[in-house]
Image (cartoon, rainbow, N blue to C red):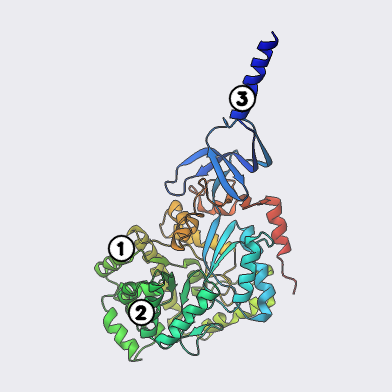
Amino acid sequence: MRKLGYAILFILIIGCNQNPIKNYDLVIKNSNVIDIITGEIDTQNIFISEGQIVKISTSFNEGHYTAKTEIDGSGKFALPGFWDNHVHFRGGDSLIAANKNLLKLFIANGITTVRDAGGDLTPQVMEWKEAIKKEELLGPTIFTSGPKIDGPNATWAGSIPVENDIEITKALDSLEQIPTDYVKLYDSRISGEAYLNTIREAEKRNTITTGHMPFTVELDDAITAGIDGIEHLYYIMKGCSSKEGAITKQLQNKEIGFWQAMPALQTSFNETVAQNTFSKLKKNNVYSIPTLNIGRILSYLDEVDHSQDAYLQYMGSGIIKTYEMRINRVKNSTAEAIQNRKELDTFFGKLAKTMSDAGVSLLAGSDSGAFNSYTYPGISLHQELEAMVNVGISPLQALQNSAYKGAQFLKKDADYGQLIEGNKADIVLLNANPLEDIQQTQNIDYVIKGMQVLDKNDLKDLLKSAVNKD
């Protein structure tokens, strides 16, 4: 009998050793996990340790485990934390605190990553970026371009001016030293030659480039040079015109300006030219960031009263003051110019849908930040997703245009963009299915960012703490 007892004890010990207790920081049980690629939904359990997804299973045959935190995901829908692929931190030293406060708005809206598209607060942004990475500061992961590259006397403060190859080399060297995550080009003063040469030099360095495009350059030349992303749709529209060459020469000769070229480009849109352009964009893996929501907001500033917008309370007087630039521009515009802008806004919606149908990769970006009137950090990304769906893009595609494609564009998809084992634990749990109603992206129950877990009450408190009392 004693020998039998020892045998049973030995078997139990071996069994325990074969199925050791597993320890996790967080387990999300029985959530409806959305496959961001296929749109399929499975009830799954997500196991997280040290801010990383270590296991996803469809059953609980996991043996014994312990978890510091458990979330019952029953009836909830899990998907990657949202990415806003075009934001700005800017406005000079007087707006540093106001910009830092905006970080709360992103997290409160389930946005766990942002792509900062250039500004004049690079030292502060790099500090925030590092503190967020260490989880010493609550905010979204920041990927930044740092200062924009432009020409002499650029429109935006903090821009690096380039006119020749020597200056281009120095500019790119300086961005590498920061170091930034990609290069953002702007079109206010840069020459066509310097623009294309900057892209070519960045391409040699295997550096991602995106931005505006001088209208003195044809879109095909930018694609050939190696541009990776085109911010906004003006430049795509130009490449879809049957008269792009002639209109470009008029711009080069300064016979017309940027806004004067718009009606001519719009009316000369050609479906055959457009499809050829889309094919080139797709073949060269060039992404487009439509920024539909801000386009609509700015197009209707003459009609819509924003004085009671709920998000004004988070902006602070300094940021609200910067809105006056665009507001005054509308006040000083002719009725014809205002109407042209509205027609262009409608046209851009159709263009975005056509591009998506053609397989061009789109990114969801809000363009939120100082100077961009009434386009509020956080909530405006949800409005951008809704704008995409409103023009005919499917909810699944709109969601893909946020985290999934955002991670691909910045070559961060080994860590971000999907809920799969090995990826960062950036997760939102929604109370309803966004594939059925895109507005449900705002119906957030939990936000998980690494080791940080915030439920809906935490998110409400975060919003309350973001009210600017200056």
Q: In the rendering, which numbered label is found on residue 263?
A: 2
Q: Looking at the picture, does residue 59 appear above or below residue 118?
A: above
Quarter in which the C terminus is drawn = bottom right
At mark 2, the secondary structure is helix
Q: Looking at the picture, does residue 450 appear above or below residue 218?
A: above
Q: In the rendering, which numbered label is found on residue 14?
A: 3
Name the residue at 24% across, 67% down. Answer: 272
The label nearer to you, 3 versus 1, is: 3
Q: Looking at the picture, does residue 326 appear above or below residue 460?
A: below
Q: Position of residue 208 (x, y in %)?
A: 43, 69
Q: In the rendering, which numbered label is found on residue 283?
A: 1
Q: Residues within 10 Å of mark 1 (few under 14, many from 20)?
A: few
What is the spatial separation of the Cα atoms under label 3 and label 1, in whole angstroms?
57 Å
Q: Position of residue 165 (x, y in %)?
A: 40, 85
The residue closer to the viewer here, 236 or 454, is 454
Q: Residues within 10 Å of mark 2 (few under 14, many from 20)?
A: some
What is the spatial separation of the Cα atoms under label 2 and label 1, in whole angstroms?
29 Å
Q: Position of residue 141 (x, y in %)?
A: 58, 62
Of the residues shown, which amino acid type is indicated by label 3?
Ile
Q: Position of residue 395 (x, y in %)?
A: 46, 52
Q: Is residue 398 visible?
A: yes
